[in-house]
Amino acid sequence: MKPLIGITTNQSTNIHGHPTVFLMQSYINAVRQAGGVPVLIPSMLAEDGWDALYSRLDGILLSGGGDISHELFSGEPHPRIDGVDPARDSIEWKMIQSAASDGKPFLGICRGCQLVNVALGGTLYTHLADQLPGALDHDYPGNRRTVLVHEVKLEEGTHIAGIFGEPIIKVNSLHHQGLKDIAPPLRVAGHAPDGLVEAVELPDHPFGLAVQWHPEWLTDQEWTRNLFRKFVEAAEG
């Protein structure tokens, strides 16, 4: 039986003023292409609903989206912080801590990577351009999502390097925040040329990986397809 992959979602209000849950189809397509069954996770679930859903899922994909509340990591306030969703922060925090503890496979993407770091004890730069000396421009909102803008050097011997099979990859980039202090349980798996950490993993976990770029838009490349294949295979057990 194909594994059930829970994918976290965003909340907004549509043009008619109705509350809406939404997710870019690229996440769904990447999971389906890899052999998983996507299950969308609304962030407004009650505690008992979250427990019931989590127990049925074989893997968790923490998707991109708005910024994480700086209050969760005693971060520096900044006027560029936008799209904070406390309900989403809360449910994903629980998912990350549960999955890190019980071994359920998880993959964090962009915002998901940042929250993995925060939930396990790390911090963020709340705006890279102002807080990381010599930072590259990591935020390209006007680009097509498939445009590759900078390299990531992968750390030899890490799970992520083994999955991608290349020491250096080129990635897209759609974020203005980034990993600062890395959570103690995590191992750094990749850096951008400016030194910013772009990939982390839990060394002794069946599949606990997180990347700062958006691989779901890059599934035309074999190394990216292999990331989702390995994730779904881990979820199959």
Image (cartoon, grey):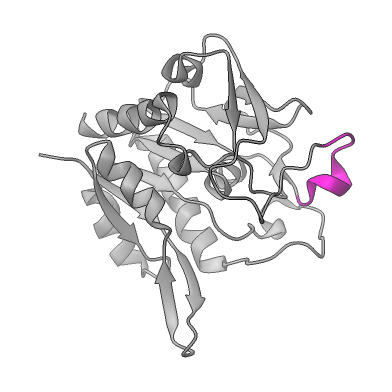
What residue span does the magenta drawing correspond to? 126-135
- In the image, residue 20 above or below residue 174: below
Quarter of the view holding residue 106: top left
- In the image, residue 154 above or below residue 128: above
* Residue 60: in magenta span: no
* Residue 129: in magenta span: yes
Quarter of the view holding residue 173: top right
Image quarter in which the C terminus is found: top left
Residue at point 51%, 43% (across, down): 109
Q: Is 168 in front, or is 21?
A: 168
Looking at the image, the residue that sits furthest to the left is 1
Tell me residue 181's x, y (percent): 73, 35
Tell me residue 229's x, y (percent): 31, 30
- In the image, residue 149 above or below residue 60: above
Tell me residue 216's x, y (percent): 44, 43
Image quarter in which the N terminus is found: top left
Tell me residue 96's x, y (percent): 46, 45
Secondary structure mostly seen in magenta is loop
The answer to whether residue 18 shows anywhere in this view is yes
Residue at point 47%, 51% (across, down): 63
Q: Is 132 in front, or is 142?
A: 142
Residue at point 47%, 82% (across, down): 14
